[in-house]
Amino acid sequence: MRILIVEDEIHLAEALTQILKKHHYSVDAVHDGQSGLDHASSGIYDLLLLDIMLPEMDGITLLKTIRSQGISTPVILLTARGEISDKITGLDYGADDYVAKPFSTEELLARIRAALRRKGDVVPEDGLKFGDIELNTGNLKLTCKGKELKLILKESELLELLMSRKLAVTSKEQIIEKLWGFDSEVEHNNVEVYISFLRKKMTFLHSAVRINTIRNVGYVLEVTS
């Protein structure tokens, strides 16, 4: 899951970034409304944490703009206590939830999980299952029929993306945007290398799950008989 933080308090943004990464989210952070709009408009994020009081463009205007563009990414507003009118306005313009500063880490994480569940994404506490494999995103272990092995972080993130999309084809561009960011200079052969790594490890586990290549389109998981 990739989260965009739009927060002009740099220390808070950095703290949130570290907390979310510790809980295995991919995170980008920007510090003004215009940069937030540029990033959010890419459509690559699963959730936005959006401050209301921002330079260049306020959070409510940013929210109205992405909703007018048809972007339905869940948005949680970060508000100061007592900003009742801003909370109401934000919810009316399409925010999914809000948290008032200062907030606890546990509350924020719970609200993120709830927002992602409402969106329809699978947000497991420990891992994902597909066919005969189970991926634990906490310890990066891939398990199949009682056997397990450790993945490196990018392998785990890539497999998590494929598993969360189930039978949907995922393009190399989508993989790069999700795992490295939309402005990354990573090339397609980097994706191919990690796909190769995963295939070898799944073969080692004698899994019936395969990463199928759809020529000129992307990759999809399938279970062989």
Image: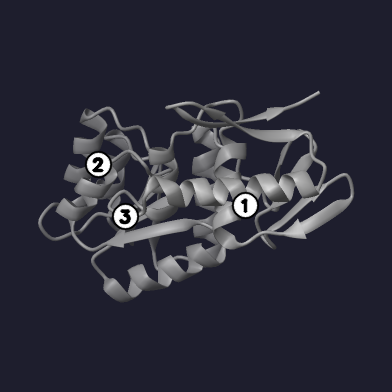
Q: How many marks?
A: 3
Label 1 – label 3 distance at C-alpha: 21 Å
Q: SS at mark 2? A: helix
Q: Residue at x 80, y 37 (%)?
A: 132
Q: Which mark is residue 184?
A: 3
Q: Earlier in the sequence, mark 1 or mark 3?
A: 3
Query: Mark 2, residues whose alpha carbon is within 10 Å: few (<14), some, or many (≥20)?
Result: many
Q: Considering the numbered disc 1 on the image, is that residue within a helix, a strand or a loop?
A: helix
Tell me residue 191's x, y (percent). 47, 47
Residue 147 in percent (x, y) is at: 86, 52
Where residue 124 is drawn, which disc sits there? none
Tell me which amino acid carries mark 1.
Answer: Phe
Q: Residue at x 89, y 50 (%)?
A: 146
Say which residue label 1 marks.
197
Residue 63 is marked as 2
Amino acid type indicated by mark 2: Leu
Residue 123 vertical placement versus 92 (above, below)? below
Q: Between label 1 and label 2, give the one nearer the viewer.
A: 1
**Residue found at the very far left of the displayed protein:** 56
- In the rendered image, the vertical position of residue 33 relative to residue 19, given as above or below: above
Quick one: label 3, few (<14), some, or many (20+) residues within 10 Å? few
